[in-house]
């Protein structure tokens, strides 16, 4: 029997992007699948209209992408929940790829998918939320590098609820801005579950931001990364150390001389914004007690 999916899409004030996202998702899904849009827009009318056109349920709630996703999970009727962002479009084989990832074994609690640039955006200078590895892979506590992104991510409802769902202090619209997806994966892996990266679950991420928007985004990514590091350091210090090396050195400080020599001023600004944000996020997490907290069971 084919595993039915509940697709949860958090959105706020981006009706044109949402419409493209929903049309692609509806084309990829089968009759037993469902789409749940969780909208925090001040004006709910556009989202309601687009949802009706694409046979999606639309829920209204307050802001915060993690809060919206948790609400979507609680409303979902199926055991496997797939999350895509409203600025993502999925391929016709995307849903089958998600199902294939979960078919690898009962211990697979989550699946991350492939994310590429939209056709025509190949020259975009600083693509974000991209994962283009060509081969499938098991994801464990020993895995290094980017495990995946919440823009194209699926999870079984039981493990998701067991570990507390998305931490609503993290993510867009929350005090700690970002890293809600990777921090959730941390908790799932530490609870003894495994994940799966499945390239057949292909999506494209629309790179709609300009350079100034990207500097702000890198700052936000840094805030979330710092908070994630602070919490992970309390529970898995070796992994936290590896993550810090990857984010702060391999993908950070080490790049600055080459970017400066190339005269890529915004490239330097992106790196510095992320490094500064990481320091601030780490300190905020330590001072606020976030590093020691564990999200309550989601019910």
Image (cartoon, rainbow, N blue to C red):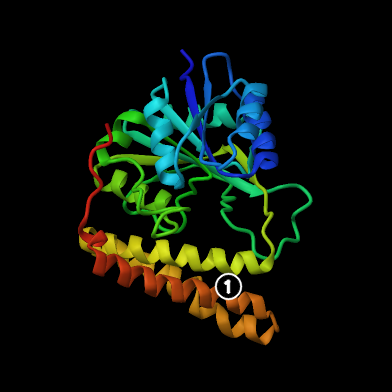
The residue closer to the viewer here, 272 or 242, is 272
Looking at the image, is 110 positioned above or below residue 275?
Answer: above
Question: Splitting the image into 4 quarters, where does residue 179 fall?
Answer: bottom left
In this view, the residue in front, 234 or 97, is: 234
Which residue is at 63% across, 64% downward?
213
The answer to whether one can see residue 183 in this image is: yes
- Position of 11 relative to 255 (above/below): above
Q: Residues within 10 Å of mark 1 (few under 14, many from 20)?
A: many
**Residue 215 location, x and y as percent?**
59, 69
Q: Quadrant of residue 123?
A: bottom right
Q: Is residue 176 above or below residue 270?
A: above
Give residue 245's quadrant in the image.
Answer: bottom left
The x, y position of residue 46, in whole percent, is 65, 34
Residue at point 64%, 38% (across, down): 18
Relative horizontal placement of residue 266, taking residue 12 as reference (left or right)? right
Q: Is residue 265 left or right of residue 133?
A: right
Identify the residue shown where x is 42% and y is 21%. Answer: 78
**Residue at horizontal 25 percent and vertical 69 percent from the top:** 287
Residue farthest to the right, as pictured: 120
Q: Which residue is mark 1?
A: 270
Residue 111: x %, y % from top left: 45, 38
Quadrant including the C terminus = top left
Please provide percent x and percent y for residue 36.
51, 28
Dot 1 falls on a residue whose secondary structure is: helix
From the viewer's perspective, is 106 left or right of 84?
left
94 or 77: nearer the viewer:
77
């Amino acid at each position: 029997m084919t595993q039915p999916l509940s697709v949860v899409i958090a959105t706020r004030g981006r009706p044109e992007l949402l419409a493209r996202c929903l049309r692609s998702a509806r084309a990829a899904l089968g009759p037993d699948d469902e789409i749940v849009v969780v909208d925090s827009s001040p004006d709910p009318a556009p989202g309601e209209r687009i949802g009706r056109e694409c046979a999606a349920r639309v829920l209204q709630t307050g802001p915060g992408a993690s809060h919206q996703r948790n609400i979507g999970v609680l409303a979902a009727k199926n055991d496997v929940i797939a999350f895509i962002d409203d600025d993502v479009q999925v391929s016709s084989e995307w849903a089958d790829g998600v199902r294939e990832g979960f078919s690898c074994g009962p211990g697979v609690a989550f699946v991350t998918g492939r994310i590429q640039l939209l056709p025509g955006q190949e020259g975009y200078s600083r693509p974000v939320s991209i994962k283009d590895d060509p081969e499938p892979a098991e994801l464990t506590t020993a895995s290094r590098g980017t495990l995946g992104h919440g823009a194209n991510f699926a999870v079984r409802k039981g493990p998701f609820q067991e570990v507390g769902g998305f931490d609503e202090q993290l993510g867009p619209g929350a005090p700690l801005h970002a890293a809600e997806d990777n921090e959730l994966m941390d908790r799932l892996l530490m609870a003894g579950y495994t994940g799966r990266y499945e390239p057949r679950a292909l999506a494209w991420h629309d790179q709609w931001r300009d350079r100034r928007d990207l500097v702000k985004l890198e700052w936000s990514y840094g805030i979330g990364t710092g908070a994630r590091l602070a919490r992970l350091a309390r529970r898995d210090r070796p992994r936290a150390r590896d993550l810090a090396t990857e984010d702060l050195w391999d993908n950070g400080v080490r790049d600055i001389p080459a970017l400066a020599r190339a005269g890529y001023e915004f490239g330097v600004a992106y790196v510095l914004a992320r490094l500064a944000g990481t320091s601030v996020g780490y300190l905020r997490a330590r001072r606020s007690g976030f590093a020691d907290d564990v999200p309550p069971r989601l019910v």
